[in-house]
Amino acid sequence: MPERTALLDSSGRPDGTQRPSPVGLPLGLLRTARPRQWVKNGLVVAAPIAAGELFSSGALTQLALVFALFTAAASAIYLINDARDAEADRAHPQKRHRPVAAGQVPVPVAYAVGGVLAVLAPTAAAYLCTPMTAALLAAYVGMQLAYCISLKHVLVVDLVVVTTGFLMRAMIGGVALEIPLSRWFLITTGFGALFMVSAKRYSEAVGMEGKNGATRALLSEYSTGYLRFVWQLAAGVSVLAYCLWAMESRGFSEATLLPWRQLSMVAFIVAVLRYAVFADRGSAGAPEDVILRDRPLALIGLFWITLFGLEVAKL
């Protein structure tokens, strides 16, 4: 009997997991849906802002709906991913506190809720939005499920999939409002996302040097030199594409007091250089954390929004 008692932890369960409760289950599901990650879905307004259509008739209502649907789709992936990785997460010093790994959310429940959201989001988009919006959302869900199952174990492809997820967020707002997407907008967004994703991977790789194990399955197979090359290449391409987009005459108003759209290149380049500081130090964590916590970067972003707002307002 003493030996059996010794196997029990403070929760009273032999496996160290928590006993699900009626109150804890909804909170656990919400935590698993990663509310902090919902900031990323703000990218749905990127294309309408770039086209100057953010405040057109019905645009905000449609974008709010798209934001909610994309959030539901992303939450579905988080739930399914945590259910698949529950056993491995229990052996990780930080991830073992995730609701599914800790037993606050049973694995079958996480699978069930994730599956319902994964089907519901594209289906609702088919009825409430354009067919292309529903198709793009379905493609996002399918790609992310493939990532959870196998693609996250394939070198380089894992970077491409995560980057494409950001690009789809930026595209879907324009698709929902049927706004033509500039080639330079797509290149800037895609390589800008690759810059942040590879910078984060680089920071993780730097942080684990000299340590055993990795927080990601493939991280130990990437060299820090390679990841540095990727984020530097991506930063350069995104800056070049943005400058070409800002300089193109289509959609540019000649009646403004100053060439605000062209001046916004300064803010964009300074923002990339500022973000690169964190990448170079190996401290570029989650993009939303870097952007929200660094005051100079936030001010640069506000400056960029001001310049672009002046261009849209034709002042």
Image (cartoon, rainbow, N blue to C red):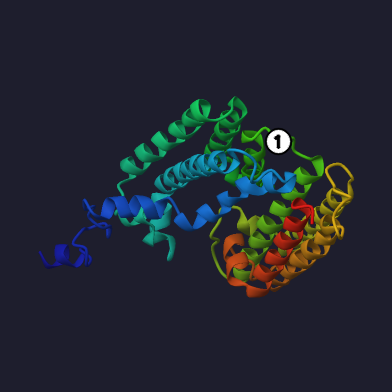
* Residue lying farthest to the left in this orientation: 1
In-front residue for pair 263/120? 263
Q: Quadrant of the N terminus?
A: bottom left
Which residue type carries mark 1? Ile
Rendered view: 232 above or below 114:
below
Give x and y (percent) for residue 43. Answer: 62, 49
Can residue 87 be seen in the rendering of this structure?
A: no
Give the secondary structure at mark 1.
Answer: loop
**10 Å neighbourhood of mark 1: few (<14), some, or many (≥20)?**
some
- x and y percent of residue 56 in the render? 65, 41
Asked if residue 81 lies left or right of residue 159, the reply is left
Q: How many marks?
A: 1
Taking 98 as reference, is 186 above or below it? Answer: above
Determine whether, in the image, residue 248 is placed left or right of residue 287: right
Image quadrant assignment for residue 277: bottom right
- Residue at 83%, 60% in the rendered image: 265
Q: 139 or 182, which lies in front?
A: 182
Residue 181, by quadrant, is top right
Quadrant position of residue 6: bottom left
Q: Position of residue 215 (x, y in %)?
A: 53, 60
Q: Position of residue 272 (x, y in %)?
A: 76, 64
| Residue where numbered disc 1 is placed | 179
Residue at 41% of width from left, 35% of height from top? 115
**Which of the pair 181/157 is nearer the observer?**
181
Q: Residue at x 89, y 46 (%)?
A: 248
The foreground one among 30 and 85 is: 30
Q: Is residue 228 above or below residue 191?
A: below
Q: Residue drawn at (81%, 45%), measured in percent from left and top? A: 184
